[in-house]
Image (cartoon, rainbow, N blue to C red):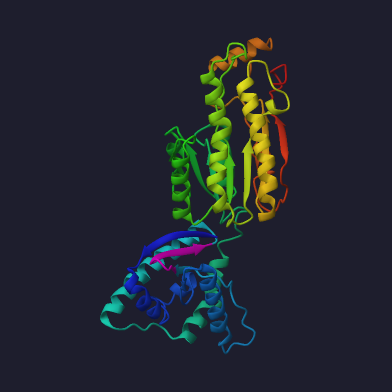
Amino acid sequence: MLSLPAGSLPLDEIASVADFSRHGTLTPEHVIHNKPFPAILDRDPEVGLARFAADYQAYVARSTVPGLIPLALHPHWAILADGAVRSYGPTLARAEVSADVAVATLRALRTAARLGGWQGLSENDLRDLEYWELEQAKLKSQGIPLPLAGKIAVVSGAAAGIGKACAEALRDHGAVVVGLDVNASVIDHMNRSGYEGIVAELTSETEIAAALARVVASYGGLDILVSNVGIFRAGAVVELMSDEVWDQTLAVNLTSHRKLLKQAIPFLRHGMAPSVVFIGSRNVAAPGAGAAAYSVSKAGLTQLMRVAALELAAEGITVNAVHPDAVFDTQLWTAEALETSARRYGLTQISQPHARRGDFARCRSGGDSTCGRNIFKDYRSANSGRRW
């Protein structure tokens, strides 16, 4: 369920607007999109939601049509205790329509409060319209939602490579996706509502917290986290490796993931079938010479995944890892790095196969309760000559 901002009210106007919101919708058709009234939420939202469900069920029960089955008992818009107004919808498109209707309704009700009154259609008329078969057909005609419709995903390192492919896979399955990356190019391809990029330094917990707060304020929560950011310095053997290479590699490939997970957990806790996927590396099982910092950081990331899986399983948050192999079409693999690796393994060429989205989708979310799992995938090209 997505939630979008739909305006706000001064605290001293909440009571009057809440009262007038029970006097009918702004136009008859608005009842199809936003139900006959909003939820009025107190400091404890669960109390307000339970009250809305009871009120809506009673509204349906007052129908003279025998056997009328209530629609889902959740609101399509709500007025919060701090005056914020939010819309709710099973898809981004539905939530956007509800937000537009709520904004218009709010403006009219505030005017009505100043003028001293407001009355729309009667409850019976609204209910007859809301449950009119032709009106319900409008909603049903939108088709079967995609498997991740209504879910909100964050992908780190989404400017290119594996992160970009993950973001695209989640988008194609119906999720709202926000990509985080220090590279400003993330906003070039993730540049629209429901598929947007945020430039953030992912080694900074302050910037991570601000980015996640923006996601939650914009879309209402967090359900899927793909922690993917990483760097690779080729050819740095242990004897000659500088402290700078070691420290920076662990800061990006390990510590930044812990910071991102730490800041995401409070939101994932309230998500729908929440899940975390770490992007590891085949180096965890088969480290290569000259890749000590990278291999150690990915091994540490795998242990972080396992510990997080144990800690979060009781809360229904699944945590898994995918370990790709031979994915060269990423910014980690510069021409210099490819040449160094080819030379080390006696190859004249390393081609650039693409990671398959389906392998990522196996542990990204949605009905799979697997937790603490490592999935190793080899994407080597048939003409590369050797496994990499």
Image location (x, y in percent) of residue 330: 56, 27
Q: Is residue 56 above or below residue 337?
A: below
The secondary structure that dominates the magenta segment is strand
Q: Quadrant of residue 26?
A: bottom left
Write the residue at 57% across / 17% down: 337
Q: Quadrant of the C terminus?
A: top right
Q: Nearer the viewer, residue 153 or 33?
A: 153
In the image, is 350 to the left or to the right of 161? right
* Near-viewer residue (135 or 248): 248
Toward the bottom, the furthest residue is: 64
Q: Is residue 86 magenta?
A: yes
Residue 331, compared with residue 346, is above or below; it is below
Quadrant containing the N terminus in the rendered view: bottom right
Measuring from the top left, give residue 375's x and y in whole percent: 72, 37
283 vs 117, nearest the viewer:
283
Residue 230, relative to residue 107: is it above or below?
A: above
Identify the residue at horizontal 56%, vertical 64% (top origin): 141
**Res. 164 image quadrant:** top right
Look at the image and give the residue range highlighted in magenta.
79-89
Residue 173 in sight in this render: yes
> Looking at the image, which residue sits at the far left?
115
On the rendered structure, is 106 left or right of 332?
left
Q: Position of residue 4 (x, y in %)?
A: 45, 59
Give the number of marks. 0
Q: Is 9 situated left or right of 235 in this image? A: left
Name the spot of residue 90 as percent of width and height, x first: 55, 61
- 270 within the magenta span: no
Viewer-proximal residue, 340 or 295? Answer: 295
Q: Looking at the image, can residue 280 be seen? A: no
Q: Residue at x 61, y 22 (%)?
A: 293
